[in-house]
Image: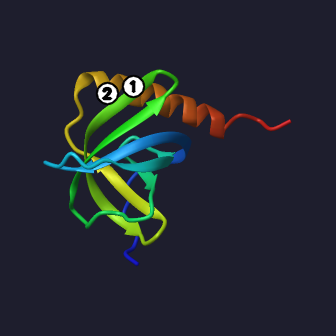
Amino acid sequence: MQPERRNAFRFPFDAEAEVSLENTEDRLPARVTQIGPNGWFLQMAKPFEVGAVVFVKIFVEGTFFRDACCRLYSQPNVGMGVVFRKLNPFVVAVLQKWLLEAMKAKHKPSN
């Protein structure tokens, strides 16, 4: 197993996702379990190779995120961490909204 190399905080997040390798039409289902300002952790049975360029589409309550990411590390049979590449302005706004919601949820006092 490769060491995790994230360079920013991640927060719990739960969303459906589709992942495909660059230049392919094959989409694999995944689940986003963590979100951060630089990337995601995608739960999936067969993660891609380190450095693979993947397209990730995430669905949350009628909103979606779709952009290219680069696979950074994996945990076999668990999933992979991906880092964002060049984000377009539309997805930056969506990412910021989801990240703020995830941060608030994590720091929400429990009753």
List x then y, in percent, for residue 14.
56, 41
Of residues 64 and 72, the one nearer the viewer is: 64
Q: Are marks 2 and 1 in contact (CB under 8 Å)?
A: yes
As measured in the structure, the alpha-carbon distance from the residue carrying label 2 to the one carrying label 1 is 5 Å
Which residue is drawn at the image coordinates 44% and 50% (left, top)? 30
Question: Which residue is the site of mark 2?
Answer: 91
Q: Which mark is residue 94?
A: 1
* Placement of 70 over or under 99, stated as above or below: below
Side of 104 relative to 65 (left or right): right
Crowding near the residue tagged with mark 1, few <14, some 14–19, many ≥20 C-alpha atoms within 10 Å: some
Tell me the kind of residue under disc 1.
Val
Q: Which mark is residue 85?
A: none
Tell me the kind of residue under disc 2.
Val
List x then y, in percent, for residue 17.
42, 42
List x then y, in percent, for residue 50.
25, 66
* Placement of 10 over or under 51, stated as above or below: above
Seen from this angle, which residue lies furthest front? 26
Side of 76 relative to 13 (left or right): left
* Placement of 89 over or under 83, stated as above or below: above
Residue 76 placement: quadrant: bottom left
The quadrant of the picture occupied by the C terminus is top right
Seen from this angle, which residue lies furthest left? 23
Give the colour scheme of this rendering. Answer: rainbow
Residue 72 placement: quadrant: bottom left
Crowding near the residue tagged with mark 2, few <14, some 14–19, many ≥20 C-alpha atoms within 10 Å: some
Which residue is drawn at the image coordinates 40% and 31% (left, top)? 95
Of residues 21 and 110, the one nearer the viewer is: 21
